Image (cartoon, rainbow, N blue to C red):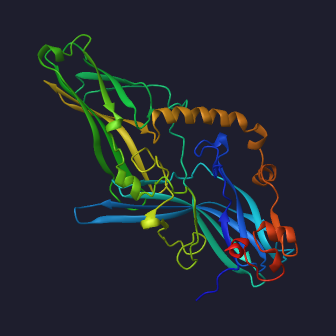
């Protein structure tokens, strides 16, 4: 049996978010800020030489090839790495240590997500490597951190303008014009598309429109694995035209089609429970994982972090459904497919890319206002600072709990009567 560390490690309990700013929007300075608390296990002193922190993203996907077979792939990416504490020149025994830390979340950070329909999942780990005692022993500690990206909010200027496009039929006999009010949509939105189909020239007098079919399609692409791109239609709207109502001469035929996203991929209660999204589930898992079983800083081998009833955690409640995801091991993209059926001419198919945001309309509006507020709160000088300068500005100094301090001994909840030896916590004394 391996010797356990003389301390335990956890993130400081707080009513504040662990993630500050808005990942995916760099001008809000997205970052993880917290305090790593290291405490003596039983009152015995120890020394901490250094602490190294990393953000690692673990992605996995399983794509069905046939009814009986599937292809699987996994990828772990180190997103960021830095030394958050270094005391190698003046190591002395201590009872505890509080280390404030700041880790920026770069634009490449992936959103935490689980999609049962497509068989993919992304988890983000905050990992610490502690070097301790004179023998320079190493201890690994890992925490699941739910990460949400906000770069598909419909109100963002890049998406708030309409899509206006057109395409001609393959035989050149008619033209299709369309307009869509926005480029990104919330999960409870209604996608409204205005379409006009008109003949080109005077040689198409007998051309008539029979049907316009509008489809919302999603496609999963897995990178550098040889996986085929998988696609499916998730919502369809249809408009049919009879006789003279479909005549395309002159001003042509205009119509409006709507796709209600509330019908699209609503997670069931079972999915929510399987994702560990119960009312009492903590968004951060203070989970001790053995270096021999899992650590992004060590073996990169997957371990299923669980709570009661083996329910996996670490996922935002909004992120167990289909929404647009780009990059990493896989992407999930959305598009509107136009299918035009005519008589006395060639049918046409055309595709227009759009984005589906994981938030409801009311939530997305509130989030965007919060984003605007955050942008105003972040001083311009912060954006020009180095990481070290930013850490010095935003963080307090580490707090050391001294072995010879009665006050520090009692702060840790240790019995005053055991000062200087292997102690008992006050809670144990009371019991």
| Depth order, front residue of 301/271 | 271
Q: Quadrant of residue 206?
A: top left
Q: Position of residue 40 (x, y in %)?
A: 73, 75
Q: Position of residue 298 (x, y in %)?
A: 59, 74
Q: Which residue appears at 57% of the width and 51% of the height?
A: 108
| Depth order, front residue of 311/191 | 311
Q: Position of residue 73 (x, y in %)?
A: 41, 65
Residue 216 against residue 157 in the figure, above or below: below
Position of the N terminus, as image quadrant, is: bottom right
Q: Which residue appears at 43% of the width and 44% of the height?
A: 324
Q: Among all residues in the image, which is located at the extreme bottom?
A: 1
Task: Tell whether 203 sits left or right of 9.
Answer: left
Viewer can see residue 406: yes
Q: Which residue appears at 45% of the width and 25% of the height?
A: 162
Q: Quadrant of residue 374?
A: top right
| Depth order, front residue of 108/102 | 102
Q: Quadrant of residue 202?
A: top left
């Amino acid at each position: 049996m391996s010797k356990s560390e003389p301390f335990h490690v956890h993130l400081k309990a707080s009513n504040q978010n662990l993630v500050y700013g808005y990942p995916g929007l760099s001008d809000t300075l997205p970052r993880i800020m917290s305090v790593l608390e290291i405490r003596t296990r039983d009152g015995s002193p120890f020394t901490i030489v250094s602490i190294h922190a990393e953000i690692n993203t673990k992605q996995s996907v399983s794509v069905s090839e046939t009814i009986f077979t599937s292809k699987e792939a996994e990828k772990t990416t180190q997103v960021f790495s830095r030394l958050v504490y270094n005391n190698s020149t003046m190591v002395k025994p201590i009872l505890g240590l509080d280390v404030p830390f700041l880790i920026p979340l770069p634009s490449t950070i992936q959103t935490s997500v689980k999609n049962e329909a497509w068989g993919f999942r992304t988890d983000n780990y905050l990992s610490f490597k502690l070097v301790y005692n004179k023998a320079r022993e190493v201890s690994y500690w890992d925490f699941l951190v739910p990460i949400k990206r906000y770069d598909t909010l419909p109100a963002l200027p890049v998406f708030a303008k309409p899509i206006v496009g057109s395409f001609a039929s393959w035989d050149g006999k008619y033209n299709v014009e369309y307009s869509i009010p926005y480029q990104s949509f919330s999960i409870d939105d209604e996608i409204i598309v205005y379409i006009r189909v008109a003949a080109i020239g005077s040689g198409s007098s007998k051309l008539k429109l029979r049907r316009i079919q509008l489809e919302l399609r999603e496609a999963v692409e897995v990178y550098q694995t040889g996986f085929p791109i998988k696609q499916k239609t998730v919502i369809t709207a249809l408009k049919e035209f009879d006789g003279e109502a479909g005549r395309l001469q002159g001003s042509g035929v205009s119509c409006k089609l709507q796709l209600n996203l509330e019908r699209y991929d609503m997670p069931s209660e079972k999915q929510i429970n399987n994702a560990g999204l119960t009312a009492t589930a903590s968004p951060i898992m203070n989970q001790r994982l053995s270096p021999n079983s899992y650590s992004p800083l060590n073996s990169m081998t997957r371990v299923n972090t669980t709570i009661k009833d083996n329910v996996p955690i670490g996922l935002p409640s909004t992120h167990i459904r289909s929404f647009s995801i780009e990059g990493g091991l896989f992407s999930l993209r959305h598009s509107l497919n136009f299918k035009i059926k005519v008589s006395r001419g060639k049918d046409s198919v055309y595709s227009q890319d759009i984005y589906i945001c994981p938030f409801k309309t009311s939530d997305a509006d509130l989030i965007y206002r919060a984003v605007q507020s955050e942008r105003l709160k972040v001083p311009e000088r912060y954006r020009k600072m180095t990481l070290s300068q930013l850490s010095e500005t935003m963080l307090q100094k580490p707090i050391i709990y001294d072995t010879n301090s009665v006050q520090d001994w009692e702060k840790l909840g240790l019995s005053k009567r055991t000062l200087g030896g292997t102690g008992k916590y006050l809670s144990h004394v009371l019991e």
